[in-house]
Each structure stands twice: as C-alpha cells, then as structure tokens.
Amino acid sequence: MTDQTPDIIYTKVDEAPELASASLLPIIARFARAAGVSVGTRDISLAGRILAAFADQLPADQRQSDDLAALGELVKTADANVIKLPNISASVPQLQAAIKELQGQGYAIPDYPENPKTDAEKDARAKYDAIKGSAVNPVLREGNSDRRAAKAVKAYAQANPHRMGEWTKDSKTRVAAMSGGDFRSNETSVTLKDAATARIVHVAEDGTETVLKDAVSYPAGTVVDATFMSAAALSDFLAAEIEQTKKDGVLFSLHMKATMMKVSDPIIFGHAVKAYLAPVFDEFGDRLAALGVNPNSGLGDLMARIAGEADIKAAIDACMAARPPMYMVDSDRGITNLHVPSDVIVDASMPALIRAGGKGWGPDGKEHDAVCVIPDNSYAPVYDETIKYFKETGKLDPATCGTVQNIGLMAQKAEEYGSHPTTFEMAAKGTVRMILEDGTVIHEHAVEAGDIWRSAYARKAPIEDWVNLAIDRQRAEGCEAVFWLDETRAHDAELIAYVRPILEARGVADKFAIMAPREATRKALETIRAGKNHIAITGNVLRDYLTDLFPILELATSAKMLSIVKLMQGGGLFETGAGGSAPKHVQQLQGENHLRWDSLGEFCALGESFKFLAETKNNAAARILGEAVEAATQGVLDDNRSPGRKVGEPDNRDSHYWFARYWAEALAAQDEDAKLAAEFAPIAKALAEHEAQILAELHAGRGTAVDLGGYYHADPAKVAAVMRPSATMNAIFA
C-alpha cells in the first residue's frame, strides 16, 4: 500500500466481483485520469487479510499491509471516498480452504487450530477468529445506510419484468420460529445516561465467578442490550419442527446468518445438525467426538471425518431416510442445507424461496414446499408475514409494483451485528450479569449450560444521524415512511424514545409511522402492490434482510441496488449492492470461461463516487464523468447489454466493453467540457469501429476451462489474461 491516499479507493475483494474488477478497473482508471482523479486499490480480500494478520511471520517479499485497518481509519475522516465491493465473510471451512491454498503457494502461515493448546496456537486462533465471519463491514461502516434501486434499474425491471413463481392459497410453505426461550423473548435493554465501562461475568451455582469480558466502554446515551437463547428450548423446538415437517410432507430448511453472526449462528446451526441426526449422535457421540466432529462445522465436515467408518455412515443414511427431505444447496452434487454453515444465508435464501412461489429444491432435483426454520423470533415475522400475504393475494407483479427503499442504522457496529466480542456459549449453569464500574447491574439472566448469551449496543450519535437521514430521504421522496420498530421489544422501545422527540422537534412527526416489523411488512407489500413507494427505516439486521428481500422481488437481484453510506465525518462509502461474492459464478468461469457476474452495482456506485468527489473536491470534470457513467449505465440497460447466464451468451467482459463505449460516447457528446469531449471522441470512435474485432477477441476461448492460479489468492497475470483477452481493447485504454 502506498502512503498517498488515492482520490477514489476501489476495494480488492474475492470471487466474482474481484474477477470482474480485473476487467473493469483498468477502464475506470483510464477515464478517471482525464479528470485528474487517482484511483487506487486496498486489499480486504480473505487471503489479503490472512496474510496481513501473519505479516510478522513472513519474509519481506510476502508481507501484506493491513489495508482493512487503514481503511477503518480513513472512513473516520472527511477524505474517504471508497467503493466497497462484496467480500467473503468466511465460515471456518472457507477459512481453512484459504489457509491451505496460501500454504500451497509457499506462504508459511499456521494451520487453523481447532483446539488450541500452546500460546502460539492460541495466538493464531485469535488472529483467525478476527478474520472469520463478517469482519470487514463493521470496520468500514462508520455511517448509516441509504439503499434504493436506481431509477434506471427500476425502470428497466418494470419494462422487462422477471419471472415470479406462482403462489397458491394451499401452499404448505411456512416459517417456523421459537415461541419462547429465544433472543427475542429474553431481551432486556437500557439507555446509559452517562459514559460507562462494564464487565460481563458468569456466576456459577457454587459462587465461582468468571469474567467473560472486561472493560467494555460505552459513551453516554448508548442503548445497551443483553439476551440469551436457551439451548434446551432450541433443541426442543428443532426436534418438534423436524417431526412436524415430516408430517407435512415438505422440505426441512434452516435459514441462518452464520457469516455476519459468526459466534451465535454457527452454534445454532450445530444444534440443527445434531437434531436432524439425533439418533446418530445418541449412538455414536463419543466416537464422533474422537474423530474431531464439530456439528457447528456442518454435515459436509462430518461426512469427511467419518470416511471409512462404515457403521456410522450406515446409521446416517438410515437416519436421513427416516427424516423429512432436506432443502438442497446443490441437489446434483448432494449438497444439503446443513452441509456448510455459510451455504444458506437467510437474507438471500428466503427471498429466493419467496420469489419462487414458496418453493425450494429437494434431493430429487424438483421444487417442493418447505418449512423455513428461523429459530429466533426477532425478525422471522417479516418472512412469515410475507409468505402469508402472498398466499392470500398471489405473486407480486414486477412490471407495476412500486419500490421499497431503506434507511438503515448500522454505523459504529450497531445492534446485533456488533455483538461478536460479547457473545458466549455458557460452560455451566448460573447467572450472567453485566455490571458497570460503580457496581450497578444493568442486565442479569439466569442461564443453563449451553445457552448462548450476547450483548449488543447502538450509540447515540449513530441513532440521531439515522433519524435525520430518514427525515432527509422522506423529504426528497415525499412518500410513505415507516420506522420498523416494535414497542413491545425491549431494544426497539429504547430506540423509539430517541425517534419520537427528534421527529417532533423537527416538525415532521406527521410524515412518519412507527410499526412493528410484521405490520410494517404487510404495509410495505400493500403499498408497492399499488404501485407506490415505501421507505423502510430499520435497524441493522433488518437493513440487511430487507435490502435483499424487496430488490429480489422487484428486480430479481439485490446486486443492482444503489447503496450509499454517508459517513458520519463527511466521507463517502459506496457499496456495490448486496448479493454476496457469487462463488458459483467463479466455478462457471473456471469450467467454461463464462463470468455471468453483473457489474451494474459497480456502475451505480462509480457514478455516485465521482459525483461525491466533484462536490467535496470542487472537481467539475469528475461531476461530468459521474453523469456520463449514469448515461452509460442507462445504455447498458436499454440495449440489453448485461451478462447472460449461459456460455455462448455475452458475459461480464462484454458488458464492460459496452459500458466503456457508452461512457466514452457520452463524454464525447457533452458540451460542458471541451477538453474531455476531445479526449474521449477518438476513444469512442475506436471502440465503435473495432466492435466486431473486440467482441471476437473477448469470446475467444469461451466454453473451455481456464486456470486462474488460485481461488482465494489467484495469480494476477493469469486473471488478467482471462479477464482482458482483447488486445485491441486493451490498447485503446493503455
């Protein structure tokens, strides 16, 4: 990493978006140069973060700077202008695979210690644990979220509506959530009047006190929550739902967020694995433990560890035959819902199932109704109400529906997504207390061994910024705006105590409603079915869930959203939409040299980044570049230049050619800046004149396997050869 901060930072990430960057970024850099704008990269990829964590153990030529930490500081300044692409939120299996690949490339980094004993192993485990899960977004999100469909994208979706599955009133698909003993029912919440430091202690029945976390500091006005999930209640719930699903004759499915909720949700996932295979764990529990089986790692890891254990394998086969069929990740390859904790992510899996008319893929390769198990009842009602609504009213029409925008509270690790350091699996029965330095106990819960206890918080400044951002967005849109807050939930009641006075002080209380998530879900669906718009003002988790749910219903994807993070210190973070990093897209490229990743999210973020730069740096040429990006994006949509799914169709690289051409043509045609017009007129002409040759070069080798030199840590030269195969186009942008 260089000492000088570029005007625009484009993040180096993982999988499909990083492969697309190899094609798109050289184009961006060439256009930006014309406006005196520097564009640089910072590495926040999984491999990059691993190497940075162990830089002190590597030779100088292999060391990686800690770019994530540097960006974490930059986003706290007014100079930040960061385009953030999706990165891997690593599960343990993904982390282990990345470690193995790096070791194979000659990087002497330690293995992931599953049961660390020595100080060196404990140190390595701590470093790896800081990398796994959603370790990037909480560091960079020093502002609240403004997500919505760009007008051009929404207009295209209405003119070219995607297919929606049919909903019927007799659908057996339903959501199953715990009725008690979960995080929702056990939650307590307080707002701290003064700045405070707390410690979290566990007091066993015999009086033994264990400090779980010491010196947790909060500024004045922080909303601090605590709650727990009962392991016994969870086990009973899972067992009952497995039996009920069998009676219903539908698929069993579990929908979690094991990436973002990297401590609690893998444990819950492990409970589901044990519940589904209960007879096997009852009979072979000791042997499975001796084999190193950890149900939290999933069925895939379990099956690998019992290879050669014929009797255990037979027992698993018999158990699965007696259980309800499982929702499948990949029925052709036998990859089940319970194979890997990170394979089925609730905010992606539930919208896909709902869009499909409540159908999921079964082991037979066919679609079936499904029971959707979402154990915690905090946010499950959103999906439950959505399914009930569509059963009553039928599918949504993308050609006529309005849109749901989102203003999300996420700054400074707000709410559950910041709870990783204060989440614990209880080792023994007892009481957990959260105690301030003056001895005040602000939270207290009686727990059993195996219960999952956690604390989360939301600070005053981000909450106030969130409410004011919502007011600004509602004024700009003039449409229905609802705070999705439940006054009967402890945490939400504390937020409402902030929201109402701010709305009243600014004279806009009549412009907003406050509704519990279930009621707000139905309100939003009714509104967009009528062709009108709705602004959902939510906490951090619902921000994540809704900015997948509604875009997938409206646009067929969440990767095309305009996602702006207005950093609290005046900088800008421009996220390229949701949708993850698309590992299946990488597999298709490796096997068929076809990358179906759609860079529309990058285009939208790029335009906003240039316009933000123009405003903050008084750079008129950057504004013109940004406006031309919007024209180019419109051209890609209008002329249907987005990637196709199948080999032989245009792919990501073709779309970049057309984007670059439309961008150059827009700049050549504008009359505000003669210098820019003169510079890009010959580029536009060359791209048009050499269209056939460029497209032929881009398509050479399609349908054949390609070597990227790695998956998590690919060879840049090999990636460039695959992603920039047109010598003619490369020469134009040299």
Image (tube, rainbow, N blue to C red):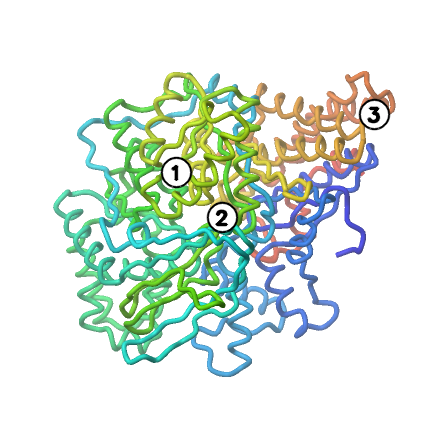
Tell me which amino acid carries mark 2: Pro
Question: Which quadrant: the C terminus?
Answer: top right
Q: Quadrant of residue 711?
A: bottom right
Residue 575 is situated, as x and y percent measured from the top left of the image, at 59, 40
Q: CA distance from mark 1 to mark 2?
A: 35 Å
Q: Residue furthest bottom?
A: 118
Q: CA distance from mark 3 to mark 2?
A: 38 Å
**Which tag is nearer the camera, tag 1 or tag 2?**
1
On screen, residue 152 versus residue 392, left or right, reads right
Q: Secondary structure at mark 3?
A: helix
Residue 235 is situated, as x and y percent measured from the top left of the image, at 22, 60
Mark 3 or mark 1: whose residue is earlier in sequence = 1
Question: Which quadrant: the N terminus?
Answer: bottom right
On screen, residue 638 versus residue 729, left or right, reads left
Judge by depth and name the residue closer to the eye, 27 or 449: 449
Mark 3 or mark 2: whose residue is earlier in sequence = 2
Which mark identifies residue 676? 3
The vertical placement of 465 against 58, above or below, is: above
Provide the residue designation for mark 2: 583
Tell me which amino acid carries mark 1: Leu
Tell me which amino acid carries mark 3: Leu
Asked whether the beta carbons under mark 3 and mark 1 sit within 8 Å of each other, the answer is no
Judge by depth and name the residue closer to the eye, 659 or 143: 143
Q: Residue at x 37, y 37 (%)?
A: 352
